[in-house]
Image: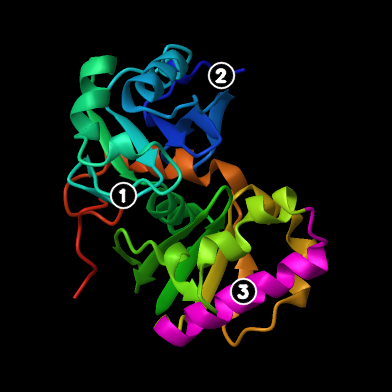
Amino acid sequence: MTDPRDLAAVAAGIDIGGSGIKGGVVDLLTGELVGERVRESTPTPSEPQLVAEIVAAICARLPVAGPIGVTFPGVVRAGTIETAANMDPSWIGVDAGTLFGDRLRRSAVVLNDADAAGIAEMRFGAGRNRGGVVVMVTLGTGIGSALFLDGGLVPNTELGHIIVAGTDGEKLAAASVRTSRDLSWKAWTGRLNAYLDRLESLISPDLIIIGGGISQDHARFLPRLRVRAKVIPAKLFNDAGIVGAALASAAPAGSSADPEAPPPA
């Protein structure tokens, strides 16, 4: 196996989720993971210092120096956490870029987890060379979203929290709801249909990309969906967040992988 340290164009990415924290080394030219993917459970409670310790432990197993990208499941503005629906509320107001940078003793770029996954899919996966309005919906503990206009990211959309029939969208149709309520694929897909129908009514996307770990089971539910836009599964599956985080860590300011960059004019 090739040692990641022998490759010139690699970077490390960490993907923080409500149930697990994953990390890996990414080949920035291909989007492929190099070496092992490392996963640890998200601590309970998921407080900032406890999460930072897990991130540090994962980083210690990734043989790459330099800046690192870290995702977070919530609104992230200039590295500061503004929402934390599936994490401990003590995260709100935390300068996560400084927190991780100080703990890891390296520069850390922090961005929304779904935005990171979307960046990866638009660069290497299902969204490659796709124009118009593209939305990636990540289904996991909650529902994340990444919105793109002609390839440019509109950051922190958090469309998983739109209200569907009086209910927060992710409480209706997240992948975790299917397992926690022991729903059949047919029953859960009905909920997902209702969510996507509401999403379409708000943004009229040209393409919907379904991501998250459940995208590997797309044959069980995609054929049952009845929405106007084309719906396709992600190609990077549950590695997309890691890949997007690594891309963000290496992105020049203003580039398409920079989470703070505006969409193109």
Answer whether residue 121 is visible to the viewer in this image. Answer: yes
Look at the image and name its color scheme: rainbow
Name the foreground residue: 234 vs 90.
90
Question: Residue 67 sits in which quadrant?
Answer: top left
Residue 165, position in %: x, y? 55, 79
Q: Nearest to the eye among marks 1 and 2: give it.
A: 1
Q: Which residue is mark 3?
A: 231
Measure the C-alpha gap from mark 1 to mark 3. 28 Å
Q: Amino acid at mark 2?
A: Thr
Residue type at the position of mark 3: Val
> Which mark sits nearer the N-terminus, 3 or 2?
2
Q: Do the CB atoms of the residues marked 3 and 2 lie less than 8 Å apart? A: no
**Element at badge 1?**
loop
Q: Which residue is mark 1?
A: 83
Closer to us: 232 or 144: 144
Q: Earlier in the sequence, mark 1 or mark 3?
A: 1
How many labels were placed on the picture? 3
Q: Residue 129: x and y, percent?
A: 45, 68
Judged from the image, the secondary structure of the residue bearing numbered disc 2 is: loop
